[in-house]
Amino acid sequence: MRFRLTPQDTSFYDMFASSASHLVTGSALLTELLGADGPGREELAARMRDAEHAADESTHELLRKVNSSFVTPFDREDIYLLASNLDDCMDTMEAAADLIVLYQLGSLPTGVSSQVEVLVRMSELTADAMPRLRSMRDLAEYWIEINRLENQADQVYRRLLAELFNGDLKATAIMKLKEVIDELEAAADAFEKVAHTVEGIAVKES
């Protein structure tokens, strides 16, 4: 662990924890949305947009903090990258929810629920990991499990694609569903990028 001769502002850790907490909210709303009817989905999509705006504000607050701070707990570039990657997780989940409503999709393939289940677990692990940035301890199990879950998400995604193109759906239905599952796959990728960024920070600070 590197020694620093200047005091650190520990509020950054609280801000990262706050940003990650929005992801737990977002994945829970996404789960609810899948099981809701048309009007219920619209209401949940609106709540999802509110959650995404709250996440954006947390990101902006963090960036304002780093821009106004003389001393940061770790490299500024890594703070920017981690904040941006956390924001991407929320953006892609919100986009998937929005598309489900905009395209007025009815029943969704069961694989979509499997995708969201992976995102729920990823969001929980990420929220649990952020406070541990303070000590940089016990983080390896986090990024290892996130990587395993991302591989699982890839498998679900490929099966979903096969079902879409091997079935009897019309081309327009295939295109709409593919956009949704693409966004959910992008969300899983975004969570993995967060984990990779955390791993990089931990290596630098060790």
Image: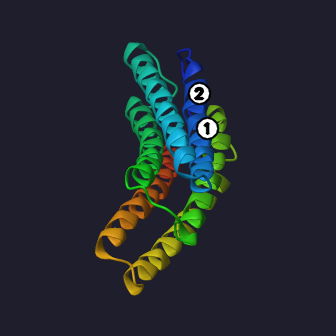
Q: Determine which quarter of the picture holds residue 128.
A: top right
Number of numbered labels in the structure image: 2
The residue lying furthest to the left in this view is 171
The first of marks 2 and 1 along the sequence is 2
Which quarter of the picture shows residue 105?
Answer: bottom left
The reply to whether discs 2 and 1 touch (Cβ–Cβ < 8 Å) is yes
Residue 121, how many percent across, how many down? 65, 54
As helix, strand or loop, the secondary structure at mark 1 comes to: helix
Above-or-below relation of 178 to 40: below
Q: Which mark is residue 197?
A: none
For mark 1, what is the residue?
130
Task: Pick the quarter of the image with the N terminus.
Answer: top right
Q: Residues within 10 Å of mark 1 (few under 14, many from 20)?
A: many
Q: Which residue is mark 2?
A: 13
Residue toward you, 60 or 168: 168
Q: Quadrant of the C terminus?
A: top right
Q: Secondary structure at mark 2?
A: helix
Q: Residue at coordinates 62% horizontally, 49% vertically from top-left?
A: 32
Answer above or below: position of 33 versus 178.
Answer: above
Distance (Cα) linking label 2 and label 1 = 7 Å
